[in-house]
Amino acid sequence: EGWGVVDAVGEGVSRVAVGDRVAALSQSSFAEYDVADQAAVVPLPSELDGLPFAGEPLGCAMNIFRRSGISPGQTVAIVGIGFLGAILTRLATDAGARVIALSRRPYSLDVARRMGAVETLALDDHYALIAKVSELTEGRFCDVVIEAVGKAWPLDLAAELTRERGRLVIAGYHQDGPRQINMQLWNWRGLDVVNAHERDPAVYAEGVREAVEAVRSGQLDLNDLITHAYPLEQLDQALDATRDRPDGFLKAVVRMR
């Protein structure tokens, strides 16, 4: 999730020049120097000078939003309000959707309200949440549900909140083992299930470019989304905060200097 200033360019590189500030889709963001293909580097305009710009997760949010197919008038539930869920709340609201945000942390629900969510629910009781969303939607449930947690229970809940022939979007990063899903429910409701993780580098880079424009235009305010900053010497504390999510935490940046 790195960004920085171009120190040198290789032969044939024409998209960026030495001194350009860029976001990079590379693998060594905690190093002083990194090497990336020019196709994986996105220039940052002067309007963003001095602003932390984590291009990879911002681009990921833009791509997930595109894959979600949200349109005006739809009811959209977003399960999990971290950095990603907060951005998706703003994008969905701006697209004319009615957003129901679910998160276990009161602070995250406050963020969701600032991002435009019209309803916020504590992510706690499975069956009570199903009943509440049914009540809010007059029994229809939601046109689109985006699961942005990466855990089994929120994924199960997300499916329950999706209406018949609705769209279930998997945005959470599920990397802790297999999942057992309620295929009977998925079949019965005829759900469209979208795994919104991109692997095409060109699509990733396009998402970052879209994020640049969203921030430059004021649609996304990173000051609302980045809550903590650490020097590189405190990387261990930054990673602990990412895992433990203390009150008031949404996203941290780690600075080299």
Image (cartoon, rainbow, N blue to C red):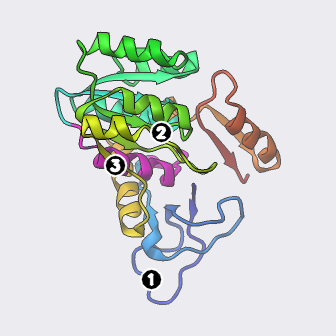
| Local crowd size for mark 2, using a 10 Å CA cut-off: few (<14), some (14–19), many (≥20) | many
The answer to whether residue 150 is visible is: yes
State which region is magenta.
48-70
- Disc 3: which residue: 194
Q: Quadrant of residue 228?
A: top right
Q: Amino acid at mark 2?
A: Leu
- Disc 1: which residue: 13
Q: Residue at x 36, y 31 (%)?
A: 90
Q: Residue at x 40, y 30 (%)?
A: 78
Q: Residue furthest front?
A: 184
Q: Amino acid at mark 1?
A: Val
The answer to whether residue 221 is visible is: no
Instruction: Give the Cα separation between the discs numbered 3 and 1.
Output: 36 Å
Which of the two discs, 1 and 2, labels the residue nearer the N terminus? 1
* SS type, badge 1: loop
Q: Main secondary structure of the magenta part?
A: helix
* SS type, badge 2: helix
Instruction: Give the Cα separation between the discs numbered 1 and 2.
Output: 32 Å
Q: Is residue 63 above or below residue 82?
A: below
- Disc 2: which residue: 84
Quadrant containing the N terminus is bottom right
Q: Is residue 98 above or below residue 237?
A: above
Say whether residue 4 is magenta.
Answer: no
Q: Amino acid at mark 3?
A: Val
Nearest-to-viewer mark from 1 and 2? 2
Residue 131 placement (x, y as % from top left)? 38, 12
